[in-house]
């Protein structure tokens, strides 16, 4: 929940929100929505065109991690709204760093967020806890850069 | 890369090809490292004990590391496959894009 010390609210496109189907994630997401800390963004035609283009272009190289329609929509919405996008998929970050049309979109993964939240020993503990809770592991190269591997 | 370049140009999109080449080279290395990590850490006896199509979905996940893709291709709900992933000890690996220095967040470019 420390995430809310970085951002007042989270926005999830409807297509992303509707992927949460099982407990306890579902109840957790609904509770956040009830508290207005999570807003569900309806589908907007103005975002659709860019989302479709992102989908086609990012997936043009099949040897790289693909992007799916909900995530492409989230990236397009982030661009249009000027918000950061939180995702652990490397492809949206690659797209934002190389495609002129997406320039300026800030794409952050879990490690970027943890690094913004904590430092030093607290960061080390948070990384350990996060890995134990989620089964998510981070690039050894990046951990070495942080001095925690 | 030439095919991609043509495709993007036909759509009138500008790409920083030098950054693309550099970042994808790092990404491919990172993806290979992540694949090896998943192969090493996965509980193969658990994976082999699962019924189809779960068994194949978990094997696919070890190879490609993409939970959503494995879920879609094998028609298994995302949350269910993720629970199985945890039981099978298959890590989800967050890779990096930069070859050195700071992290590749756009804010830091």
Image (cartoon, rainbow, N blue to C red):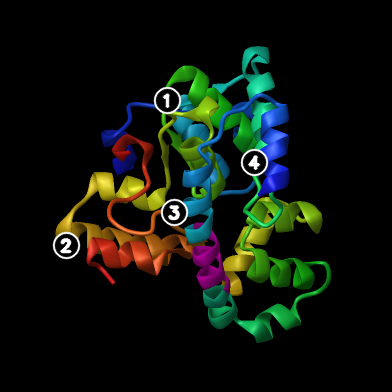
Indicate which disc, 2 or 4, sits on the residue closer to the N terminus. 4
Mark found first going from the N terminus, 1 or 4: 4
**Viewer-side residue, A59 vs B4:** B4
Residue A104 sits in which quadrant? top left
SS for dot 2: helix
Q: Nearer the viewer, residue A19 or B40?
A: B40
Reply yes or no: does residue B28 show up in magenta.
yes
Chain at tag 2: A
Residue at image x 69%, y 43%? B4
Give the side of residue A3 with respect to residue B75, left or right: left
Looking at the rendered structure, the secondary structure element under dot 4 is helix
Asked if labels 2 and 1 touch by Cβ distance under 8 angstroms, the answer is no
Residue linked to disc 1: A83
Question: In the visual, does A54 lie left or right of A129?
Answer: right
Indicate yes or no whether the magenta region holds residue A20. no
Q: State the residue position of label 3.
A: B97
Q: Which residue, as the protein is rendered here, is positioned at the far bottom?
A: B45
Q: Using the rendered image of the protein, determine whether residue A130 is visible from the camera's viewpoint.
A: yes
């Amino acid at each position: 929940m420390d995430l809310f010390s970085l951002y007042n609210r989270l926005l999830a496109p409807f297509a992303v929100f509707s992927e949460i189907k099982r407990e306890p994630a579902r109840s957790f997401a609904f509770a956040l929505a009830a508290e207005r800390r999570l807003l569900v963004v309806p589908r907007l035609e103005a975002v659709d065109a860019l989302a479709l283009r992102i989908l086609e272009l990012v997936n043009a190289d099949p040897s790289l991690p693909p992007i799916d329609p909900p995530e492409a929509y989230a990236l397009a919405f982030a661009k249009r709204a000027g918000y950061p996008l939180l995702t652990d998929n490397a492809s949206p970050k690659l797209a934002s760093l190389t495609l002129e049309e997406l320039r300026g979109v800030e794409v952050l993964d879990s490690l970027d967020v943890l690094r913004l939240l904590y430092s030093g020993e607290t960061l080390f503990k948070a990384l350990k806890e996060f890995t134990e809770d989620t089964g998510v592991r981070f690039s050894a190269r990046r951990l070495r850069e942080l001095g925690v591997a | 890369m030439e095919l991609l370049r043509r495709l993007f140009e036909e759509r009138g999109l500008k790409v920083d090809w030098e950054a693309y080449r550099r970042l994808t080279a790092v990404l491919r290395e990172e993806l290979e490292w992540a694949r090896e990590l998943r192969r090493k850490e996965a509980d193969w006896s658990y994976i082999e004990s699962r019924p189809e199509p779960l068994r194949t979905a978990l094997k696919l996940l070890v190879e490609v590391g993409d939970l959503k893709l494995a879920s879609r291709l094998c028609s298994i709900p995302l949350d269910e496959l993720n629970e199985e992933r945890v039981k099978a000890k298959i890590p989800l690996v967050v890779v990096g894009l930069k070859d050195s220095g700071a992290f590749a967040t756009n804010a830091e470019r």
